């Protein structure tokens, strides 16, 4: 049993680097599409001179500005109860 190989998700964990990068980019594009309507992140991107739709690959992540805890807290205080951070309607969260 000491030589047994255990995987959480063997199909993903055994991908070539190229295939893994393709999968990561695909999932990143899906995530960006989900948050594209989020006012908080739209504003952060615009302030940095970007559009969220410009993010196509993991290499593009370098262009994104950092988000600090202070920004998240301030946004939540300014727009209670959740700030402008929800990507789903409140009824789905509560």
Image: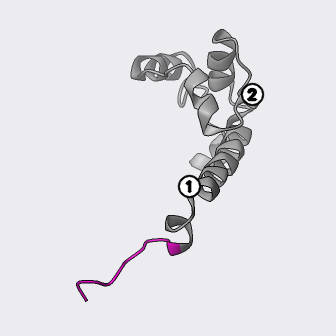
Instruction: Using a 10 Å C-alpha cutoff, classify the residue at mark 2 as few (fewer than 14 neighbours), some (14 to 19) or many (20 or more).
Output: few
Q: Position of residue 24 (x, y in %)?
A: 61, 50
Q: Which residue is mark 2?
A: 54
Splitting the image into 4 quarters, where does residue 54 fall? top right
Q: Earlier in the sequence, mark 2 or mark 1?
A: 1
Alpha carbon separation for disc pair 2 and 1: 23 Å
The verdict on residue 64 being magenta is no
Q: Horizontally, is 49 left or right of 68 in the view?
A: right
Q: Which mark is in front, 2 or 1?
A: 1
The verdict on residue 9 being magenta is yes
Q: Residue at the spot x=60%, y=38% of the render? A: 58
Range shown magenta: 1-10
Q: Residue at the spot x=56%, y=55% of the render? A: 17
Q: Which residue is mark 1?
A: 17
Give the overall secondary structure of the magenta segment: loop
Q: Secondary structure at mark 1?
A: helix
Q: Of residues 3 and 72, which is closer to you in this image? A: 3
Q: Residue at the spot x=74%, y=40% of the render? A: 33
């Amino acid at each position: 049993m000491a030589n047994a190989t255990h995987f959480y998700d063997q199909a993903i964990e055994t991908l070539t680097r190229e295939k893994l990068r393709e999968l990561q980019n695909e999932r990143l594009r899906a995530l960006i599409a989900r948050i594209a309507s989020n006012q908080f992140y739209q504003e952060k991107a615009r302030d940095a001179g970007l559009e969220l739709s410009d993010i196509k690959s993991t290499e593009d992540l370098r262009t994104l500005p950092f988000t600090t805890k202070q920004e998240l807290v301030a946004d939540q205080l300014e727009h209670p109860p959740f700030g402008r951070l929800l990507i789903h309607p409140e009824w789905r969260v509560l």
